[in-house]
Amino acid sequence: QHRAAGNGSKLVNWSPYSMGDQVLERVEELYTRAASDGSVLLNPRTWDTFWKPIADTQPAFAAYLKYTYEEETVMSPDGSTRHLVYQLARRAILEPTDETRMRTRATTIEYLQVQARAGLRKMHDERTVLPSYLTSQDGALCAAKVGRAHADTIGCENTNDRFSESVFGTFDRSLKRNEGCSREAASALAHAARMKSFATGDAVRHRKALDAPSPDASLGYFHELPWQEQHALVEWARLAQRPSRAVDRADNAQYAAYVKAKAKTASQEELKALVTEWAYGMSFFERWQERGVRSVSQLNAGLRSICACRAQACRSGCTANQAKLDWLREQIEMRTRGLQWVEFAARWSSSTDEYVGTVEELTGHLKELIEHERDLRERDELPDVAPPPVVRRKTFKQLGTPTAQAEVLMAAREELTPDELREAAEDERDRLEEAGEIDHVADAQPERPPDFASLLNVHLEVRWPYRLPDKGKKRGYKTHYIWAEGEVVEIADGTTTKRTPQCKTVLAWGAVRIKWPKDSRYDEDESFTWTVLVADSWRKEKHLGWRFAKPELARRGAAARAAKRARADTS
């Protein structure tokens, strides 16, 4: 395909659909064979026959193969011998003689099989255009379905060649050399230049040296017209000059406004993406402050708390592997998005490498992050607030002095001060929280649940089910979970506490009596209930999951900051 670019006129019976049956289906067939036997790709006969059907029908491609196989050379390092480049490389790969290549051949074959399978997955990926050209995938553009379209578009590949590039170059030169010229006028100039409409025949001969051979003295279309018509056209152009310039100015102003608006829109979208990413970064930063592991031992302990498997990669059949992956991803994104360590961004999967995105691989990656974090902590360089995200923007060296139009476009970029940007990010975070995409209260929860004995007078949120009317359901309602806030007013001791004095059953350790305030949204008065809180349900999005409420988090945060200031004062 690369070889065909710009050489469409040299291809025989070729259309935009020819890549399907002529090339892509042959590649698919080769990948299919290599997926089960990688040695196919190391067989010289494979490559002797692979391109032959195309070369038999395309003389230009046959000439290219002949040049590649038999003519292209490279000089030896000592400058004494010329070698055929392709044949030299081909022998080294397909017919190795040194011990190292021969010893690693089995590994090479295995690797080629992996790559062939990855190639097949890519060719069959519905997110790309490739399957549409393949008969095996019943593609809409496969050879069996585009016979008529192929016949009608033979030669269409010729449009994107040197001729069309030359026409565009002429148009672009006309636009730049004639400042204020509209695109319509530049198009007319390019057309006249390419068609030589105003050629005067012997003009070239007069510019050449006297002994130079005289070119064909052809006249342009304009000079072939009767002289009366020529004069009429010139007179019309003279009279229409000023009105045409007014039209051109209006057209250029409209086009410049469009480009400026487009640039501003792109800047606004870029700014919006920046603000949104910072809002998510604030969420990950708070999680890092509360639950980020600080050492490799804490990392290993966190994995063991999810699953009892001793190995980092869970044993076959273990259902906790996904939970480990989720936990590792959150810990990594606490750094890459919360601390903006974008240079440590991880890959979560790979179509060519099964090791990428595994528990073992992500564990190793998180260890590197922890070591980097430890170094920054020792140098007291860790941030106290969520840093702004890094904007990845392409920049180009300025060549010359910007034109007036370029300066206008650069001024159209959206700019905010750091304080305005942080305020916008915090507003965006509030919006995301209202939409349920992030949860500020969940982010600020500590990793481990508090001791039950310390819960007296503590404000908690408990995940509680509510029934909402829904006529579409057979039962007439649907269950909706919310985090309900209440205050712990009593804790069961596990030996004497009962739900009521009349009850005979003693409440288990972990039961707490919660005072629920009046809630007008659900038409509920103040009430009290005994609820058993389980340590395994801490922070979980499940029935009777529990966590600190917002006021409690604020109180604990203020106490922690006061303690930090006190330590700083004493030191």
Image (cartoon, helix red, strand yellow):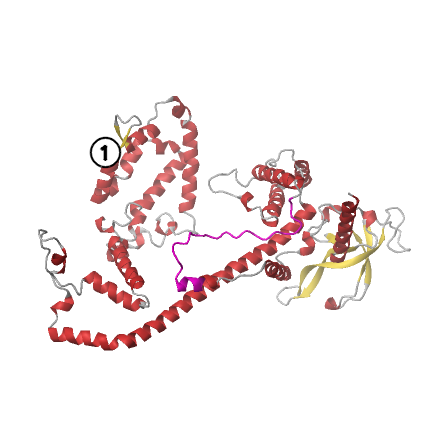
In x, y percent, where is residue 382?
65, 45
In x, y percent, where is residue 466?
71, 61
Residue beneath the point at 52% across and 40% down: 356
In x, y percent, where is residue 58?
22, 45
In x, y percent, where is residue 476?
66, 66
Query: In which quarter of the view is residue 205 placed?
Result: bottom left
Can residue 293 be seen by looking at this rendering? yes
Q: Is residue 63 left or right of residue 254?
A: left
In the rendered image, the quadrant that contains the C terminus is: top right
Q: Is residue 171 left or right of residue 432?
A: left
Residue that badge 1 annotates: 70
Q: Is residue 153 above or below residue 324?
A: below
Query: In which quarter of the view is residue 424 placed?
Result: bottom right
Q: Is residue 539 left or right of residue 52?
A: right
Question: Which residue lies most toward the top here?
Answer: 99
Q: Which residues are magenta?
A: 381-409
Look at the image and say whether residue 407 sits in the magenta stretch: yes
Residue beneath the point at 33% across and 28% down: 92
Q: Secondary structure at mark 1?
A: helix
What kind of residue is marked 1? Glu
